[in-house]
Structures are given as C-alpha cells and as structure tokens.
Image: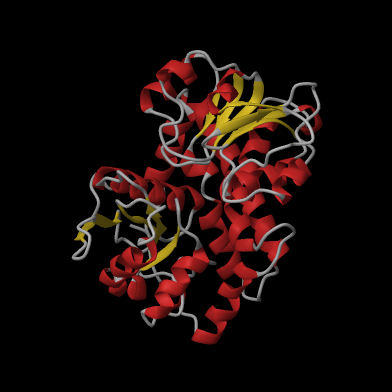
Amino acid sequence: MRSSLNTEPELVIEYTDPVEGFRGWLVIDSMAHNLCAGGLRVQKGLTSDTIRRLAATMTLKMRIAGIRADGAKSGIDYDPASPGKEEALFRFIRAIKPYIQERYSMGPDMNTTMPELDAICARLGISSIKTAVAAAQNLNADTFQQRIALLTEQAGPAALGRLRAGIGLAAAALAALEFQAIPLERGTVVIQGFGCLAASAAHFLSRAGVKIIGIADHEKSLISTDGTPLAIPALLSRCVDGMIPENAANGQYGKREDIYNLTCDVFIPAAVEKTIQEHNARTMQVGAIVCGANLAVLPEAEQTLYERGILLIPDMIAGCGGSLSMEGLFAPVDMPTVEEVLAHVENRTRSIVKTMLKRSRQDGVPPREAAVRICAETPLYPGTRPYGPLGNSTQPL
C-alpha cells in the first residue's frame, strides 16, 4: 500500500514583510484533498523548519482522526508583545488571502485567538478564517455561518471555540489513566502551561474528579503541598493571559521548572515545543506524558521514555481536539449542540488513543510509531467532503 504521508510539503510560501522586514510562512503539507487545516502562530524566532514540522503534524492529526483533509500551518517570526502585531498579522494574512478563501481552514495557534484573526479577515472581506470549509463541505453561506457561530457559544467557563482543544487533551489524559488502570478519583496530573489549551484541559480534568497537583506558567509554578488537589475552578476564574493567579487557596509557589520534579500519573506539556528533553526524560517520575503542545517531546527523549516504560500519548493524538471539533460541528446532518460537539471530541479522542495503544502492543513499537503507521495506511479520498459519511462516488487511493 502506498503511504498517504508526504516526505516533503507540497506547498511552501515564504513571506517577507515590506514594512518591518520580518518573515512568515504558509506551509501546506499535502494537497490530496479539497481542504487543509492548521493554526496561525506569532512567535519570535519562528523558522520555516518549525512551520513545516507543524504542518506535517497536522496531516497526522487528520489521518489518525479519519478526516478527509490535509495538514497546514502558518506563522510569522514576530514578537507577540509588539504593538505592531495586529498590523503585522493583517499584512501577512492579506498575502495568503487566496488560500484562506479557497483551501486553507485557518485556526488560532500560539499567541493568536480566533476573534482576533476573524477581525483581521473581516477587514479583508473574508467572512471567517474557516471560510474554506464552506466550499469543501458544499455548504451554503447561511448554513456555514450558523454552524461556525456555535464556536462562540458558551460551554460553561468559556466559549466552545476556547474549550474544544482542551477537552480533547483532557480525554487523552483520561485514556492514559484508564490504560494504567488508575481510577479517576485517584489519578494525579501535572500541567505545564496555563494558557487556553492548558486551562481548558484543567477544567475538564478537574470536573472529572482527577487531582491536579501542579501547574506552571512561563514565570512560576504552583504545587500542592498537603495532598489536597489545587483549587482549579477558583484559579481559572481569576486567570488572566495564561498566568496563574497569586494568592491561591492552597499550594506553594515556586520556579516553573519545579513541576518536573513531581511524581504523578500523568504529566501534560501544554504550552511550547521542546518541553521534554533528554535530561528530564531520564529523571521524571511519571506514569504517562500526554502531549498537548505540538513537538513537545524531542525524538531522543521519546526513546528514553519508551525504554523507561513511560507511556507517551503523542501530540498528533492528544492535540487533535480542534480538528475533531470541526468534524463534530460539520459532519451531522442536523445542527449539533455545543454539548454534542464536546462529547464527539471526547469520545473520538478516547477511541483513537485506544486504537493507537492496541497497535503499539501488537507491533511492539512506541505509541508514536504505531500512530504514524496507522496514518500512513489511511486511504486518501480526493474530491470528497472532509466531514461526514464518505458516500460512494470516490474510490480511495
């Protein structure tokens, strides 16, 4: 069987800003289907190589989820704290506008939000950063707008658009606990990061009864000291810009690196890439690592974790909640509810984790390798809608 994965991206567009001189990239990893999807990030020091690897990871997410779309990624090498960020994004998005209109379903990524990107697209006459979905799914404008608007509806502490990736990450962590035969009420979790992804995962894990005993932002950590789990709802209610609030009800503040010294059942890197390196892979006392952040674990660290018997749920699995939410949003014939979309993400994620772990045991390979093998074997269906039943009009390649 021919692999459905590319060794090189099919399209790489490099942008050089005419005003400030920074660079940006749009990478479409594959053009096998009518639609590609992936986030736009603003990151100082961003490189073409990083965008390429992130786009390839997005393709893996699509394949493992059985979504008939391909991976893409975009971003600019720019300081997100700069006052010129909005206009820098405007100029970059203007340059890639035709792809957003025709093929590229853009989403928020590091240092961007969906409202911010939608506002910029509106200035350019684009109704939504997801507008390419309408054509690929063969939806009229009204139906598309009704469904995409669901992302702005509240689902407890935040809008669906802010929670959809987090519930997928939480579901992967719950599946990791289940694989270790640890009851949820006894499971202990540590989360690196407290931004949108990490915070929403913390919300769902706390709601499930899991004990979160440590969290960290980019400045500090907060660690439980008396065996009592951290008061996540109270912390989330006072969280601003991904920072852990001061004066927590319980726990001790320390250096952000302190969380790597904690013993726990599940450790979740949910902020930036290259979090788990060889030196901490050798010493971490954890049962499993569930990667919310893309490229969170370096390859050599993955091998060390495997040799130590530490379960690793890779980023293309734990981080596919956003992609699965679009399936939950657009696949049903009738308009879904917020709760139905969230349930779809949770159920599909847990099913995918189980499939990957079964293949890992069967083939005697690390979970990531098992996931990649599944992805490579997934058929391609050019010319079909990305979401919902396949139909009989197209044969797989």
Residue 37 lies, in percent from the top left, at: 41, 60
The answer to whether residue 130 is seen in the rendering is no
Give the vertical position of 92 relative to 316 (above or below).
below
On-image quarter of the N terminus: top left
In this picture, is 65 found above or below 93? above
Residue 396 percent location from the top left of the image: 37, 59
**Residue pictured at 57% horizontal, 52% vertical:** 165
Please report the residue visible at 47 percent of the width from the left and 18 percent of the height from the top.
280
- Left or right: 74 in relation to 266: left
* Closer to the camera in the image, 80 or 190: 80
Quadrant of residue 214 in the image? top right
Colour pattern = secondary structure
Left or right side of 182 for 1: left
- Depth check: give the residue in front, 211 or 219: 219
What's the residue at 74%, 28% (across, down)? 251
Q: Is residue 226 left or right of residue 94?
A: right
Is any part of residue 143 visible from this angle?
yes
Q: How many marks?
A: 0
Q: Percent from the top left, x then y, of residue 226?
A: 80, 21
The image quarter containing residue 19 is: bottom left
The spot of residue 14 in percent (x, y) is 20, 57
Of 321 and 19, the residue lying toward us = 19
Quadrant where the image shows the C terminus: bottom left
Picture residue at 26% right of the left edge, 56% below the top: 24
